[in-house]
Image (tube, rainbow, N blue to C red):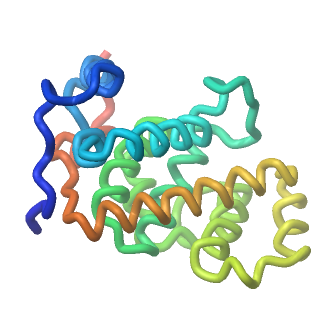
Amino acid sequence: MGQIRYPLPDLNGLPEDIKAKVMEVQDKAGFVPNVFLALARRPAEWRAFFAYHDALMTPETVGRTSGLSKGDREMIVTTTSAANHCLYCVVAHGAILRIYEKKPLVADQVATNYRKADITPRQRAMLDFAMKVCLRSDEIDDADFEALHAHGFSDEDAWDIAAITAFFGLSNRMASFSGMTPNPEFYLMGRIPKQK
């Protein structure tokens, strides 16, 4: 695996608001995802990045509802991140996708070829739209919206799909150029059902 080009900052040297958020994530996940430290080298950008991330990925935290499930959102990230060849985001968001969808194979399937994945026709339509935004956004037209509407998506849902795709296009490029590597924990998450 490649080497990260920018050393991760020391957690204790971070501004208090960022350190508190990182500790909250560590308490919940059991580890600190590398993206939280890698981006913290520039605190103002970290705050802007995670504010937009949270508005898109957990819209309820900003008082907004969405027609996309948590699994749908992670499926968009995993699929488009694969198209952008972003190892970090495919591995990290693939892990979260497996957990939300309770399907240990789905992340590998959508990252390789979502058209052959074990997903619903609705999710396939969502990913068709996301991939067009990812690769050819200048070609989006009314027919693309109509294809979404046929599966019950609203124009607001289309905005969410596009915004998630575009935001993670930024994230993919930052992770790739900087040599950000996925935490080893992500590789195993959601692959084997938890024992009850």
In this picture, is 156 found above or below 173? above
* Quadrant of the drawing holding the N terminus: bottom left
x and y, in percent, of residue 103 in the image? 44, 44
x and y, in percent, of residue 84 in the image? 42, 73
In this picture, is 119 found above or below 55? below
Whether residue 191 is visible to the viewer of this picture, yes or no, is no
* Quadrant of the drawing holding the C terminus: top left
Residue 32 horizontal side relative to residue 160, left or right: left
Residue 135 horizontal side relative to residue 107, left or right: right
- Residue 44's image quarter? top left
- Residue 37's image quarter? top left
Whether residue 192 is visible to the viewer of this picture, yes or no, is yes
x and y, in percent, of residue 120 in the image? 66, 55
99 vs 54, nearest the viewer: 54
Residue 72 horizontal side relative to residue 175, left or right: right
x and y, in percent, of residue 88 in the image? 29, 57
Q: Residue at x 58, y 73 (%)?
A: 134
Q: How many numbered circles does the render carry?
A: 0
Q: Residue at x 24, y 45 (%)?
A: 41
195 vs 55, nearest the viewer: 55
Q: Residue at x 66, y 76 (%)?
A: 132
